[in-house]
């Protein structure tokens, strides 16, 4: 799926619903029924709102948008099967398309894995919709990107 992100980035803000369907197809092929691939099964109204956030990037920092995209997709689980994989890929795609990580080198998953209990707790807190829950999630995402950027920096320095 990571290899597909560069090709999908130019279409992300123009056609977010189609790109989400493609991400699901890539993530879930072989694990869900063929007729379920790329088709949301729940949360249609909130998916529409999320697509509006994706399509209108003006004025919102890339990292904040990525956190919202990731958190909403985790909370909604709009697709059958590996919704978490789709959520993480969509967050990375947001960082790429918004120009924070135009080459797609930062892997926030490194930070999520390093802080896994916090990842789960903060995602659940985000899903609650409370101000504290949303704040906790955004803080976690920022720290995860920081961990991933540090890891990338160490790799680059060692090369």
Image (spheres, rainbow, N blue to C red):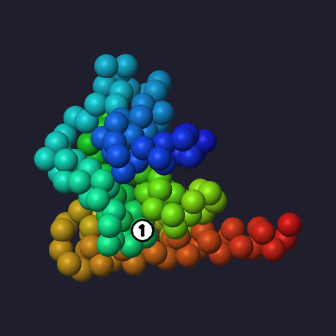
7 left or right of 122?
right
**Residue at 33 percent of width and 71 percent of height:** 60
Height in image: 61 above or below 12?
A: below
Query: Is residue 76 visible to us here?
Result: no
The residue tagged 1 is 62
- Can you tell which quarter of the image residue 106 is in? bottom right
Q: Nearer the viewer, residue 21 or 36?
A: 21
- Can you tell which quarter of the image residue 104 is in? bottom right
Helix, strand or loop at mark 1: helix
Can you name the residue that lies furthest to the right here? 159
Can you name the residue that lies furthest to the left here? 45
- Can you tell which quarter of the image residue 63 is in? bottom left
Residue 2, given in percent of the width and then of the height, sits at 57, 45
Height in image: 94 above or below 115?
A: above
Q: Quadrant of the N terminus?
A: top right
**Residue at 26 percent of width and 42 percent of height:** 78
Q: In which quarter of the image is the C terminus?
A: bottom right
Query: Is residue 13 visible to us here?
Result: yes
**Residue at 25 percent of width and 74 percent of height:** 133
Height in image: 80 above or below 36?
A: below
Residue 8, given in percent of the width and then of the height, sits at 48, 42
């Amino acid at each position: 799926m990571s290899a597909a992100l560069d090709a999908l980035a130019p279409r992300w803000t123009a056609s977010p619903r189609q790109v989400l369907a493609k991400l699901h197809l890539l993530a879930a092929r072989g694990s869900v029924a063929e007729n379920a691939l790329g088709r949301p099964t729940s949360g249609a109204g909130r998916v529409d709102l999320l697509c509006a956030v994706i399509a209108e990037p003006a004025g919102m920092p890339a990292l904040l948008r990525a956190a919202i995209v990731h958190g909403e997709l985790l909370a909604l689980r709009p697709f059958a099967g590996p919704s978490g994989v789709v959520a993480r890929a969509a967050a990375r795609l947001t960082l790429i398309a918004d120009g924070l990580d135009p080459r797609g080198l930062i892997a926030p998953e490194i930070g999520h894995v390093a802080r896994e209990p916090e990842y789960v707790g903060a995602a659940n807190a985000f899903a609650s919709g409370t101000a504290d829950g949303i704040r906790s999630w955004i803080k976690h995402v920022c720290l995860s990107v920081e961990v991933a950027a540090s890891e990338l920096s160490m790799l680059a320095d060692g090369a």
